[in-house]
Image (spheres, grey):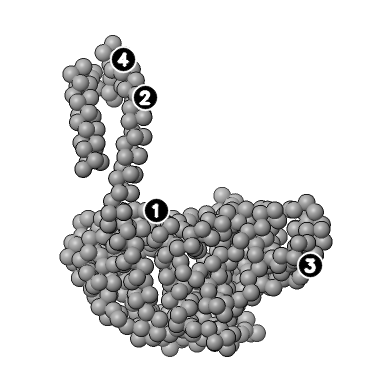
Amino acid sequence: MFATLTSLARLMRAGLTLARHDAILPAEYQSLYPAPARWLGATLRIFRRRDLAENPGERLARALEKLGPSYVKFGQILATRGDVIGERFARGLSRLQDRMPAFGDAEARAVVAADLGQPVDTLFSEFGPPVAAASIAQVHKAVTPDGAVVAVKILRPDIERRIARDIRTLSLGAALAERFAPASRRLEPRKFVETVSRSLTVETDLRLEAAAASELGEAAAVADGYHIPTVDWTRSTRRVLTTQWIDGIPLSDMDAIEASGIDRPALATRLTRAFLSTALDRGVFHADMHGGNLFARTDDTVWAVDFGIMGRIGRAERRFLALILHGFLTRDYMAAARAHFAAGYVPARHSVEDFASALRAVGEPIFGKTADQVPMSRVLLQLFEITDLFDMRLRPELVMLQKTMVQCEGVSRQLDAQHDMWGAAAPIVEAWMKRELGPEGRIRDLGEDLTRLHDALRKLPDAVDDWAEVGAQLKAGKLSLGGGPKLRPWFLRLAWLAGAAALGAATMLAFS
């Protein structure tokens, strides 16, 4: 009870903090609100501070910084969507990506020495001040005794306790939303918070981030011009991660990208294809692709850093995703609709034909259009209305994928206002579908079916023994089903015959 009351107090504090920064219903957009919202905004501005930034995005950023790292993650996603929230608002939020206040150099050195068990001067011949600071950790540039230039990432002090506190508060907020706003249940707010909380908890163990960087480095081999820094395992622990240093321009600094002469449209296409290639081909992807975590080099390559949040997608989900994307790319909306139903994304009580028509209403206006010709805010609103109309619920296993797609497209649009995500995605999706649905994919499916059949056959003797024991007890009158009539021996024989027939059918299908 005390924990609930504490979380409720923190929720109220969050609301007050946002109100004090005029970040709930900013005055700049007063004319756009309906009458009730205008009245609420005017009421909330009673609590507004006097020394506020002029940019509403910067006001929100400062409020989120005060609230904690979990709230900052939400702001980082918004910062990539200038096409939805407005470029001015997005510029104000961009400070959340890599320009948060750093903690002291003495604290950083103490963490490194304590976790690695040696003085910093022994571990590194040079150890510079922080070069970037985010909500979870900050990064220092250093040089090892053998001359390798490295990036040393160090967790913020007490970050684990702060994240645990944020998660409890967000969980309470999600529960209250489900109880008092029934329409929100379709979005599964509690499951969404659970998914985010798992990723944030993992993000506070840098050993897991090191493993994720290594895994993504292998997956990045399928993407042209996409690279991941190598991990220095001897100088990495739970609170310290050391990787190869990357000299590049962060994609959050568009002025520097423009001045460098890098081909921005080509870079946008490369980024989109890198994300889709790793997600579809390997089922793993960088799930925090905001501009501060992505760097461009003058050789037109893209480097990613910060692997605290990794996304994974199973093979079945990848196949459904590819079928849906391919349906949109080829304007075969019926195929896209069938893929939604086959995956269980749309309840079976709805009409496939009606859903295909709804998808057409979304796809046709944007097909072949460049980013600057498509009002993404209107597209998102239309998609939300369709999900409501067809009772589509949020899929927790796809939360990270959906979030990352929004981030990736947002950064690509910042690089190139005319970026055509559909055009960039087409070669990746088509190549993947040829492999998955062609001979190679069918052979792989057969191999997996045979593996499952082999596992089932290995467990069959144990099942036989179990059923024999059950049969013996039933025959002796020592066992009955739910207190009802005792199971007769002929029923057992019938069950065995049915099981044998099913096993035979599975074997024939596997080899057909």
Q: Is residue 408 visible?
A: no
Q: Is residue 211 above or below residue 478?
A: below
Question: Around disc 4, counting alpha carbons within 10 Å, would you say few (fewer than 14), some (14 to 19), or many (20 or more)?
Answer: some
Residues under numbered marks 1 and 3 in contact, where contact means CB atoms less than 8 Å apart: no
Name the residue tied to disc 1: 314
Q: Earlier in the sequence, mark 3 or mark 2?
A: 3
Instruction: Provide the residue designation for mark 4.
Output: 473
Q: Amino acid at mark 4?
A: Gln
How far apart, in angstroms, are the residues tagged by discs 4 and 1?
42 Å
Q: Nearer the viewer, residue 442 or 212?
A: 442
Mark 1 or 3, closer to the camera = 3
Q: How far is the residue under mark 1 from the one under mark 2?
A: 30 Å
Q: Residue 420 at what x, y percent from top left? A: 37, 79
Going 69% across and 65% down the picture, which residue do you hit? 150
Mark 4 or mark 3: which comes first in sequence?
3
User: Which type of secondary structure does the marked residue at label 4 adopt?
Assistant: helix
Type of the residue with mark 3: Glu
What residue is pinned by disc 2? 462
**Dot 2: few (<14), some (14–19), or many (≥20) neighbours within 10 Å?**
few
Looking at the image, which is closer to me, 283 or 187?
283
Mark 1 / mark 2, whichever is N-terminal: 1
Mark sitting earlier along the chain (1/3): 3
* Residue at 31 percent of width and 54 percent of height: 440
Q: Secondary structure at mark 2?
A: helix
Residue type at tag 2: Asp
In this rendering, the answer to whether 39 lies above or below 311 is below
